[in-house]
Image (cartoon, rainbow, N blue to C red):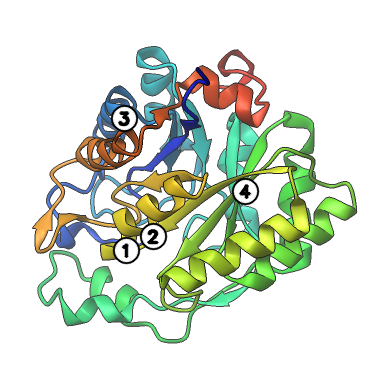
Amino acid sequence: MAKPRRVIITCAVTGAIHTPSMSPHLPITAAEIAEAAIGAAEAGAAIVHLHARNPEDGRPDQSPEAFAPFLGIIKQASNCVVNITTGGAPTMTIEERVRPAALHKPEVASLNLGSMNFGLFGMLNRFKSFKHDWEPAYLANKDIIFRNSFQDIEYILTTCAGNNTRFEFECYDTSHLYNLKYFFDQGLVRAPLFIQTVFGLQGGIGAHPDDVMHMKRTADRLFGDNYQWSVLGAGANQLKIAAMAAAMGGNVRVGLEDSLWAGPGRLATSNAEQVRLVRQIIEGLGLEIASPDEAREMLQLKGGDQVAF
């Protein structure tokens, strides 16, 4: 009998979208981020996607020094694949955004494939009181363009080229897939591509099943067998889109970066809780989750012994 297909679960544990006042369970300090990542891995995540924050007020912090403490703890405690963001926050320069991945040389780094309007202001409909002065102004800004020009993307690719780091290519709209095809045709990225299609963020493609199908069809046409597909559904879309993608042959991403919730009106108490929920869906479909080493094989990663942390 054929073995069940293996599904890679990525867990994005904190991100730069949600602010500390939105959930007491959002990891802020290095110790909390490390604990969240290790817990997610123990629950079944093969990959953990990491941002850093200022431990005092929870602001996004893209200094390599902010990453170092939790990277070391995670590496000692877990075999999971570490994925460092180069997205940072939309308010940061490209030079700031690439520094942690360039210095720490992870197995995987995220890479955004196109510029886009970026709106977090919808969250102000739900959240009204804030602990820190920076939070409401950060969320209310309707003038954010998340810049990822061809020059920016090439800068990240060339800066990290000598590290043998592979990328989680985050595609928020159809044009981003075509941008990735350009870099693939130029030989600046190589197969197997790890394509993370992102649904339901204000400024990107929506979260309707037709949107998911459209992105999958487009990626199939552009890349054929040269990629591994994964999905990220924002907010309440997280588990619905994960279920759809898992049934369609894809991999999934969960985590408090993408959604604070574990059900209608119920905050997730940890990243591990979301991993367990999506694992239940995957296994309910008769599939199995990929271990970290199986994910390394599927994505042809360099190995956890080849990083600089």
Q: CA distance from mark 2 to mark 1?
A: 5 Å
Mark 4 lies on residue: 98
**Secondary element at tag 1:** helix
Q: Quadrant of residue 47?
A: top left
Q: Is residue 128 left or right of residue 90?
A: left
What x and y, as percent, mark residue 174? 64, 71
Q: Which residue is mark 1?
A: 237
Residue positioned most to the right: 186
Disc 2 crowd rating (10 Å Cα; few below 14, some 14-19, many 20+) is many
Q: Is residue 240 above or below residue 289?
A: below
Q: Classify 10 Å Cα crowding around label 4: few (below 14), some (14-19), many (20 and above).
A: many
Q: Secondary structure at mark 4?
A: helix
Kindly identify the amino acid type of the residue bearing the numbered disc 3: Ala
Q: Residues within 10 Å of mark 3 (few under 14, many from 20)?
A: many
Q: Is residue 284 above or below residue 129?
A: above
The kind of residue on which mark 2 rests is Gly
Q: Position of residue 184 (x, y in %)?
A: 82, 51
Q: Quadrant of residue 22?
A: bottom left
